Image (cartoon, grey):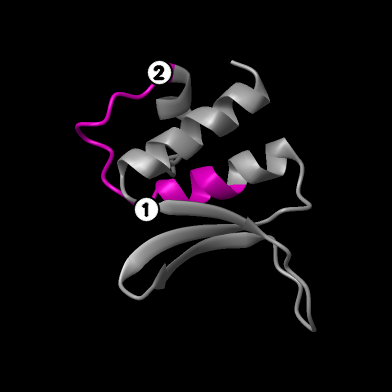
Amino acid sequence: MKVQEQLEALERLAEAMSVRVSYEPMAGLVQRTGGLCRVRGEYRIIIDRRLKPPERVQILVDALQRFELGDHEIDPELRALLTPARATG
């Protein structure tokens, strides 16, 4: 699956989970790339709109890993991305 396809699939998954994804300019004294937050009781993933698709994918993966994915139909490749790595040893 190509990066752009991953990005689109992750955006659809977020929407299905009622998590709003928005791309905003991130400027100011502290520059961030984005992440998960709650605004007025609703989850949002805000991503710096200047980021390239691979960086956007990583932010979406990091944010969506925090949710229960249970009943959602997810491509096996995406599910592998969304499954946090288990510490061994």
- Mark 1 — residue? 66
Nearer to us in this view, 42 or 54: 42
The residue carrying pointer 2 sits among few (fewer than 14), some (14 to 19) or many (20 or more) residues within 10 Å by Cα, namely: few
Judging from the image, what secondary structure is the residue with disc 1 in? loop
| Image location of residue 48, percent across then percent down | 70, 58
Instruction: Write down the region rendered in magenta.
Output: 59-76
Which residue is pictured at 56% across the width and 55% down the height? 22
Which residue is pictured at 65% across the width and 18% down the height? 2
Q: Which image quadrant is residue 46 in?
A: bottom right
Image check: 15 left or right of 52? Answer: left
Whole-number angstrom distance, CA of label 2 to CA of label 1: 18 Å
Which residue is pictured at 76% across the width and 42% down the height? 52
Which residue is pictured at 32% across the width and 50% down the height? 18
The residue carrying pointer 1 sits among few (fewer than 14), some (14 to 19) or many (20 or more) residues within 10 Å by Cα, namely: few
Q: Can residue 83 be seen in this view?
A: no
Judging from the image, what secondary structure is the residue with disc 2 in? helix
- Mark 2 — residue? 76
- Quarter holding the C terminus is top left
Question: Which secondary structure dominates the residues rendered in magenta?
Answer: loop
| Image location of residue 42, percent across then percent down | 33, 65
Q: What residue type is labelled 1?
A: Arg
Magenta stretch contains residue 16 = no
